[in-house]
Amino acid sequence: MRIAMVSEHASPLAVLGGVDAGGQNVHVAALASELAASGHTVDVYTRRDDPGMPAAVPLCPGVTVRHVDAGPPMAVPKDDLLPYMARFGDELTVAWSRRRPDVVHAHFWMSGLAALQAAAVTGVPVVQTFHALGSVKRRHQGAKDTSPAGRVITEATIGRRADAVVATCSDEVTELARLGVPTGHVRVVPCGVDVDHFSPAVAPAGVPRPAGRPHRLLCVGRLVERKGVDTAIVALRDLPDAELWVAGGPDVAELSADTEASRLADVARRAGVGDRVRLLGRVGHDALPALLRDVDLVVVPPWYEPFGIVPLEAAACGVPVVGTAVGGLLDTVEDGRTGVLVPPRDPAALARALRELLDDPARRVAYGRTARRRAVARYAWDRVAAATADVYASLLGTLVLPEVTAV
């Protein structure tokens, strides 16, 4: 198949630099690469945010990143990109009229707007993945939500107009149904994890600690309030034999200027655990597996989480997760088998769950081994790519796709 992916604000090339890479960047890069490895040809269309970037950049054999001129060629916050999506759609229309893909996969709601605009002219079927829904963001962030006005209504319209919607977790299916998206054309295909890069240590989690070393807990992710790192910090008051490492945010030399890092440091001081909280700053993709292998438990305590890659990375490394029972974690963490789920924003419940696992190394080993097996069986990228390709193929088998000649 000739596959076009649209990822208006999240370029797969950002993964290479790492600083601006988030879950969507990683997802698009890995999915495109795995589809290409299976014999498909993939073009990823993303907005040009640097005037020096060439029009087309190879990502790997079979995958080309194509930069679309829509808005100023500079970094623009994603919530400010909506005015440029009509131009983005115009450029996609021109490109697909010249060489039409078999199927389009739009990532994020604004990509869906541009893709559907072009599809109305070219007739190409559109698959939509939202990655995050505005209705959920508004529910949890309230007045702090910086999304453009009308996002929720627009997402509902996109969901109904797309030929198929790929949800990343079962919780998202429920939310889409509330928006009026027909469940009949929603398929659940999770995000994936590189199970070769993220792999267990030679010695499993739960082996005796070196003499004098406290239990080591780890949070990984962007430093934003909804990730709930402050909950883990407060929980540390009830875990006097543990320390918390926090990986994420800017480089360590720039942490002092980061607002959320400063807030977390203040939370730690007020909780009396400042000497047991270590902010590591950004940890590169290559260094992350070793960091995960060096901890007793990974803590994932967000208020809400559309999917969340960190629980998969921990599972692939054979490290149990203690997380909150929200969003994608309801699927990725099997409570009582690969980790433990607790209510969000509840430091006492989080501390109890951590205490029980820290005191039971055999249970940690068992959870870690089960988590690794489950990651390989369900979330390896070859499995995810194959399931995604099945969604594409189901559309091609039911739609008549006339060839569009070059203009």
Image: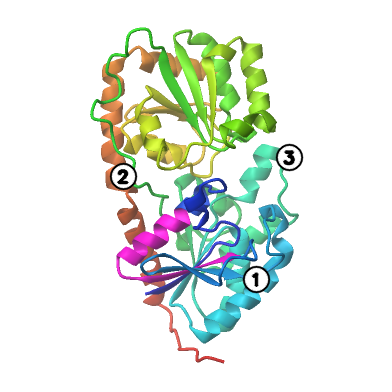
Mark 2 or mark 1, which has the lower sequence index? Answer: 1
The image quarter in which residue 97 lies: bottom right
Most extreme residue toward the left is 202
Name the residue type under label 3. Lys
Q: Which residue: 65% across, 66% down?
A: 51
Which residue corresponds to the image point at 48% horizontal and 82% vertical from the top-left? 100
The reply, left or right, for residue 35 in relation to residue 341 is: left
What residue is drawn where x is 48% and y is 41%?
308
Lateral position of residue 197 relative to residue 404, left or right: left
Amino acid identity at mark 1: Asp
Q: Which sits in the foreground, 247 or 326?
A: 247
SS for tag 1?
Answer: loop
Q: Is residue 207 left or right of residue 229?
A: left
> What's the distance in space between the residues labelled 3 and 2, CA to CA?
36 Å
The Cα atoms of the two marked residues, 2 and 1, are separated by 36 Å
Residue shown at the point (67%, 26%) measured from the top left: 262
Place of residue 311 in the rendered image (x, y in percent of width and height, measured from the top left): 42, 36
Q: Tell how many labels.
A: 3
- Mark identifier at residue 144: 3
Residue to which mark 2 is pinned: 195
Q: Which mark is residue 43?
A: none
Q: Are marks 2 and 1 in contact (CB under 8 Å)?
A: no
Instruction: Please tell me in which quadrant of the rendered image residue 290 appears.
Output: top left
Residue 234: x %, y % from top left: 58, 16
Q: Nearer the viewer, residue 295 or 311?
A: 295
- Whether label 1 touches label 3, CB < 8 Å: no
| C-beta proximity under 8 Å, tags 3 and 2 | no
- From which residue to which does the magenta span run? 27-47
